Amino acid sequence: MKRTLLIFLLCHVAAAVSAQWRPAGDNIMSPWAEHMNPENVLPEYPRPQMVRDQWMNLNGLWSYAVTPCDAQTFTPQGQILVPFAIESALSGVGRNVGDENALWYERTFTIPSSWKGKDVLLHFGAVDWMTDVWVNGYHVGEHKGGYDPFSFNITPYLRKSGEQSLKVRVYDATDQAFQPRGKQVEVPGLIWYTPVTGIWQTVWLEPVAKSYVESYYVVSDLQSKTMTVSVDVASVHVDDIVRVDILEGGVGYSAETPSTEVVAYAECIYGKARLTLPFVNAWSPDSPYLYGVKISLMRDGKILDTVEGYTAMREIKVAMDTTPNKYRRMALNGEFLFQFGPLDQGWWPDGLYTAPTDEALKFDLIKTKEWGYNMVRKHIKVEPARWYYYCDMLGLIVWQDMPNVADNHSLMMPHRPEEIGKMQRNKWAQDTFSIPGTDCQVPPLWKENYYDEWREIITDLRCFPCILVWVPFNEAWGQFDTEEVAAFTKALDPTRLVDAASGGNLRFCGDIIDVHHYPAPALNAFDRKYVNVLGEYGGIGYPVEDHLWQKDANWGYGDVMTDGEQVLDLYEEFALMLKTFIANGCAAAVYTQTTDVEVEVNGLMTYDRKVIKIDEDRFAEINRSVIEAGPKK
């Protein structure tokens, strides 16, 4: 009887909490969002590369307020569902903040008794843009950057028992300043989208020892069959031992259920360990083999900390083919591979930057793979770690963009302050070397911030084998000091290729010359000393009734189609053109785009992911034939 009563009361409490939250607005929603449970929001462990046994998810309903920037305190104005940006429907708020206001969050939590004697880390997957954090009234730290994870050791600020208070303050100027912001603008339209402010990835707690593994990074060498593992340890002692185990993995290997069969191991005082593998299974789109990784920190024979993850053996290099022209191509594991995939914006009608569920996050990638593509360009946005984890598992190559700090004169927004507008009136010289474009006038402090944020993004993402290309600039949007930025990127990660200016003001630097052409593919600039790619083309528009962000003023590049067959017929014409370009030196192509986004109706799927616009079997056959047209030697 008592057990029945307890279950009854718990169900009513959960129902009451759910009743307090509902999606804001009346925009279209994805199928996953329609069944959102605010009591169980993105419950998956958020960091597949650094798995520990114990953690606490802080996603869910928090109190919030929007105040003037100079306000030091706030009174809660309602509840917001974390981790969805306040402008999104799934936040339950649907409200713009603007550059004159700050967004506040507040909640409480209780530390489990089993964590006694441990330090406690507070993790944020990503918060856009500047974040201040208080625990029990103490300011524990600040972070600038909208796309990289960060954490604080909050142990000194915790009470011995009972409820702990957590407050977060966020400021985000969007396009009224020069912080990286991708396609966010205060006044959305055309290819520019709704602002994203505040927490937009999972918030969580984790207990660790006083000394613990902070991070690791693996560099593989196929020729020598070795992996060099660099390990960072917090509060390390001089006699601490780090043991690195490489575990047998497999295709579709899951970091959440790692193998226990050790194929190589090494111990070091801390720093770097070099391991030689008895066999090599290289990672590729056709065979995405992943090895398990286990790292243990030991002192006096006792294990202080253990993290588990995964890695891969693979390499990407530039090599010349055997044609008379000796075109430069991209070689994955020593073999030429034409890289072909969609431009992936990563936006959602209900969560904006944040997919409503982990299943939804994976859905776009599964479709990309089923459609016969072997790569995806992540367009001026960074995703949660689990997105890259799925690319690793599925075998999808990733080109990773840096979110832009500005746009250019041709896309000027009249609502911006005049001084900001003037600095963004740079000239975009598309697909040409003879008439060079001009740099955006990014102020020195914001240039420094760009380097800081790009460094953090690369450092955080370089552990994912799927990423093969870094893209610092796109279409002259906030493009500055291109040669210096390309060199900076290459120095941070010499194991990958650099596409310095995708479709922008082309420079002779990095590894790749990248042109954009809409709607039909074309290579209007070409240089045999570089890898030449078509970084964007297509954008065939097709609005599907009842699945639109707004009823009117929807658009795509070129003529808008009236059915999926028309889309596919034109796509096939473009594919035939691509094959000609491939024979004449084109090494990769990116089709715009995976889904519709707001008023853009040029996606292969509708924005709500409920309609796939094309015949998938025929579409996949076309895509595979394009990849097969690439050179084999």
Image (cartoon, rainbow, N blue to C red):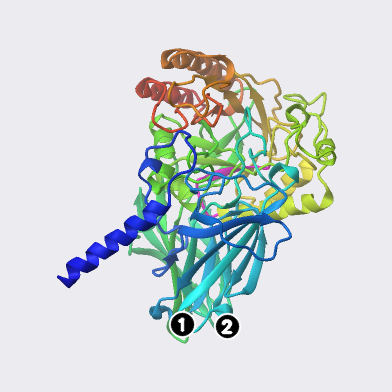
The range drawn in magenta is 462-472
Q: Residues within 10 Å of mark 1 (few under 14, many from 20)?
A: few
For the point 56% across and 60% down, the residue is: 76
Q: Residue 377, position in %: x, y? A: 55, 37
Give the answer, above or below, for where 163 lies relative to 578: below
Task: Indicate the amino acid at tag 1.
Answer: Ser
Q: Residue 336, position in %: x, y? A: 52, 34
Q: Which residue lies furthest to the left in this view?
A: 1
Looking at the image, which is closer to me, 283 or 14? 14
The residue to which callout 2 is attached is 237
Q: Does the magenta stretch include residue 577?
A: no
Q: Residue 79, position in %: x, y? A: 50, 56
Q: Residue furthest bottom?
A: 300
CA separation in Å, label 2 and label 1: 30 Å
The residue to which callout 1 is attached is 161
Q: Which secondary structure lies at badge 1?
A: loop
Task: Indicate the amino acid at tag 2.
Answer: His
Q: Residues within 10 Å of mark 2 (few under 14, many from 20)?
A: few
Can residue 454 be seen in this snapshot? yes
Q: In this view, does 74 lie to the left or right of 61?
A: right
